Image (cartoon, rainbow, N blue to C red):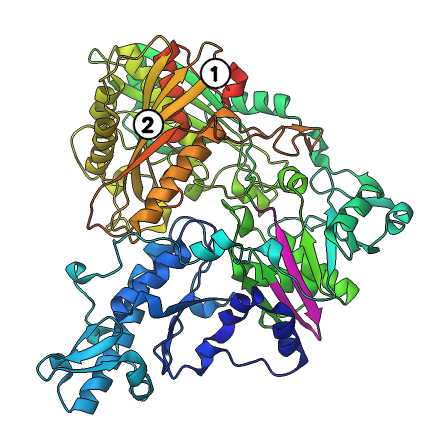
């Protein structure tokens, strides 16, 4: 049945009634389930012509909830105005639902085209059967099958019941549309939910509500892995509105997707819960992570980066090339921990009743949330249902379902619906942080200014440490994020990785390790261009060498290529060259001389199988502060389903990149995070964000690649390189506040 995801859409309308129906008797039949034609898990058509399409990935601003259904609608030849989206619950029948890694379209492009094409063929066959003609004589137009020879036409609604009686065609029987016939794919459109978002009707995790629920605010251990030694909640229970407190057990290593543990205060409103939490008197048993203080930790990272590490890629003989001499250039780069700080802090509503859990959460991965809730409550995963609300931003944070786990555990403890609400302070102090990194770079330049040898090292606590407490080295997937896949034509090259222990939760972040790898590598390229006396654009193009497909044999044997088939998604230096020349041309590279406070900087990067380049123009004012005047970003993401949303993602990436470069820094003292809100963890505001951003999409017939993340990595290094062009000052550590520039 296809109604599993319909319930969440109704939460925005009348959650109490639906909840009562869901738990007070038989589960109600949804309109989608009543529709007679259900040729796949992604699609159903009713007799009135209403077409229901499942949105099986999460919507957090990246546009996947619009793009994926439009792929189905295009092959179906549906009228988009007759389409209703149904958000899927967490269920394997929909395939992978983890909305991260910029692969929603890439992973489901062919599958969803097939789903739409299959339904279209069934409708055509049903019409041909009624008219007594061959299916080949029929064609479709939006929401109708036509027989041009006779002028007959039947709507999809009129054909739905008859089509439902036909066997579902095999894949090889379905003839998909030619690219020239696409109606929606490649055409820009606004988000399906835009009107509801703009009028306050859209439902996010913070909006969910059920009559009689408790609101919970959780006091987490300030140091990761600590536990409650003693608790005095007398003053808390005296706060008006507070109902009770409850202890959430600390996690058992490895942490994974478990809740952090702590003490929850539950009340009949959020304010009471938060005020009651302030009155808690908790004594903690601190974990061994209390040794973590940022400054000495940084020194350890940098010292590790200066030493030989584990070799992850080697071409030629780097040591021999360095021994031959040449101009030696060395540099070290440092990027701190980052918090996600998405607009909507975590929130989730859960109900435990009769051995089952129903949960509503702004989760990027409903299957992961379901499994984590089941493990925490001792249930089978089949007895847990996770509904996905809209996400008010996520950037990888909401791939971790710990906040939903908290709600389920507390509902089981209290016997009531519980909504857990994290404050902004909770969000920043107890995040799943983007890793801190130290990089060491060294090159030997020949007489032509090009590197004859290149050595690079990266050291950072890996994401794997969250799932294996003993993990200190990065895995091939993380190292393949802009580090072990260096595209330059350098005869002698070696990449090394050093160990780093983790003392906080390390998680996924928009573009993940590509951020610090692009920062180090692209800034180093700019330094080499300066050392060689070359224009950065000219130098970068020369580094790429002749247009070529980099043989897979030149890459590490365990290179993951973002899980993309290398025959379909090879590293193609011609595509690097194309985006770089396009961005430079649109920016007017060289039309204005840099210096005296004005500078232009560039950077290129391939991430999530998409090629991107950014050119930044900025002014360093008389007060020594950076003002970003213009950003030009070019991308080659293969086939782009929704160009309007692709441009929006790259525009947003320019602002986020400016935030990271200018302000982003999380630090710790004795294991506890120092920052708490936007006063000490700033983001770019209107007066500091790029004043103009232009996005240029390279037309391509290549397979679709990532959109949500690839716009971010090149921004920070392009800004830093522009600062050097403007002032002659090198930036080797982020954020710019360290240099007094922001």
Say if the magenta span includes residue 354.
yes
Q: Position of residue 275 (x, y in %)?
A: 79, 45
Q: Position of residue 245 (x, y in %)?
A: 82, 54
From the viewer's side, name the closer residue of 229 and 534.
Answer: 534
| Residue 581 against residue 132 in the figure, above or below | above
Q: Give the number of marks.
A: 2
From the viewer's side, name the closer residue of 638 and 539.
Answer: 638
The 10 Å Cα crowd at callout 1, few under 14, some 14 to 19, many 20 or more, is some
Helix, strand or loop under label 2: strand
Tell me: 212 left or right of 552.
right
Q: Earlier in the sequence, mark 1 or mark 2?
A: 2
The span picked out in magenta is 344-359
Q: Position of residue 720 (x, y in %)?
A: 40, 21
Asked where in the image residue 16 lies, by quadrant, the reply is bottom right
* Residue at the outermost left position: 149
Can the viewer see residue 383 in this picture?
Answer: yes
**Residue appearing at x 64%, y 34% in the figure:** 677
**Residue appearing at x 24%, y 86% in the figure:** 126
Point out the frontmost of discs 1 and 2.
1
The 10 Å Cα crowd at callout 2, few under 14, some 14 to 19, many 20 or more, is many
- List the residue tagged with mark 1: 625
- List the residue tagged with mark 2: 603
Say if the magenta span includes residue 564.
no
**Residue appearing at x 71%, y 75% in the figure:** 354
Can the viewer see residue 326 in this picture?
Answer: no
**Residue appearing at x 63%, y 53% in the figure:** 347
Tell me: 93 left or right of 222.
left
């Amino acid at each position: 049945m296809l109604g599993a995801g319909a319930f969440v859409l109704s939460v925005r309308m009348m959650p109490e009634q639906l909840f009562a129906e869901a738990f007070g008797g038989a589960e109600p039949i949804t309109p989608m389930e009543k529709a007679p034609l259900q040729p796949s898990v992604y699609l159903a058509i009713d007799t009135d012509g209403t077409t229901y399409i499942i949105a099986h990935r999460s919507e957090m601003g990246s546009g996947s909830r619009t793009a994926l259904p439009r792929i189905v609608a295009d092959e179906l030849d549906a009228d988009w105005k007759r389409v209703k989206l149904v958000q899927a619950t967490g269920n394997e029948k929909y395939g992978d639902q983890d909305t991260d890694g910029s692969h929603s379209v890439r992973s489901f492009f062919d599958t969803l085209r097939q789903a739409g094409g299959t339904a279209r063929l069934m409708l055509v066959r049903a019409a041909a059967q009624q008219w007594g003609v061959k299916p080949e004589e029929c064609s479709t137009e939006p929401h109708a099958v036509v027989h041009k020879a006779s002028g007959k036409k039947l709507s999809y609604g009129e054909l739905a019941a008859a089509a439902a009686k036909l066997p579902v065609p095999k894949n090889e029987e379905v003839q998909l549309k030619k690219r020239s016939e696409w109606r929606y794919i490649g055409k820009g459109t606004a988000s399906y939910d835009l009107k509801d978002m703009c009028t306050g009707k859209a439902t996010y995790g913070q909006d969910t509500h059920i009559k009689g629920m408790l609101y919970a605010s959780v006091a987490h251990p300030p140091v990761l892995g600590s536990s409650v030694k003693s608790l005095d909640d007398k003053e808390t229970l005296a706060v008006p509105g507070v109902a009770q407190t409850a202890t959430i057990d600390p996690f058992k290593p490895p942490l994974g997707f478990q809740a952090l543990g702590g003490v929850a205060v539950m009340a009949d409103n959020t304010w009471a819960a938060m005020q009651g939490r302030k009155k808690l008197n908790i004594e903690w048993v601190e974990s061994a992570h209390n040794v973590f203080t940022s400054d000495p930790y940084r020194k350890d990272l940098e010292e590790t980066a200066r030493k030989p590490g584990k070799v992850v890629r080697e071409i030629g003989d780097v040591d021999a090339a360095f021994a031959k001499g040449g101009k030696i250039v060395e540099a070290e780069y440092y990027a701190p921990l980052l918090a996600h700080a998405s607009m909507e802090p975590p929130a989730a509503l859960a109900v435990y009743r009769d051995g089952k859990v129903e949960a509503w959460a702004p989760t990027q991965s409903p299957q992961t949330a379901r499994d984590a809730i089941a493990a925490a409550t001792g249930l089978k995963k089949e007895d847990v249902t996770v509904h996905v609300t809209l996400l008010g931003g996520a950037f990888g944070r909401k791939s971790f379902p710990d906040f939903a786990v908290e709600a389920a555990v507390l509902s089981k403890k209290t016997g009531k619906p519980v909504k857990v609400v994290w404050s902004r302070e909770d969000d920043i102090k107890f995040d799943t942080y983007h890793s801190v990194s130290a990089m060491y770079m060294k090159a030997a330049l020949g007489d032509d200014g090009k590197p004859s040898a290149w050595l690079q090292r990266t050291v950072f606590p890996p994401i794997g440490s969250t799932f294996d407490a003993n993990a200190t080295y990065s895995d091939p997937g993380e190292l393949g994020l802009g580090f072990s896949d260096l595209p330059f034509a350098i005869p002698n090259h070696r990449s090394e990785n050093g160990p780093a222990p983790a003392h906080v939760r390390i998680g996924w972040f928009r573009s993940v390790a590509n951020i610090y790898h692009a920062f180090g590598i692209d800034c180093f390229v700019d330094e080499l261009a300066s050392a060689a006396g070359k224009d950065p654009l000219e130098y970068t193009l020369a580094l790429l060498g002749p247009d070529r497909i980099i043989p897979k044999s030149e890459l590490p044997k365990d290179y993951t290529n973002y899980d993309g088939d290398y025959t379909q998604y090879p590293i193609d230096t011609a595509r690097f060259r194309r985006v770089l020349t396009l961005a430079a041309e649109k920016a007017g590279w060289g039309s204005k001389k840099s210096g005296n406070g004005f500078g232009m900087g560039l950077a290129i990067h391939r991430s999530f199988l998409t090629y991107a380049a950014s050119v930044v123009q900025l002014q360093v004012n008389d007060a020594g502060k950076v003002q970003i005047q213009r950003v030009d970003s070019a991308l080659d993401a293969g086939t782009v389903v929704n160009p309007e949303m692709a441009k929006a993602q790259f525009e947003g990436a320019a602002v986020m990149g400016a935030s990271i470069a200018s302000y982003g820094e999380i630090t710790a003292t004795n294991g506890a995070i120092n920052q708490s809100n936007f006063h000490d963890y700033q983001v770019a505001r209107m007066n500091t964000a790029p004043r103009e951003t232009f996005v240029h999409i390279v037309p391509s017939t290549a397979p679709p690649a990532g959109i949500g993340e690839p716009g971010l990595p090149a921004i920070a290094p392009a800004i830093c390189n522009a600062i050097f062009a403007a002032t002659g000052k090198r930036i080797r550590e982020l954020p710019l506040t360290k240099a007094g520039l922001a």
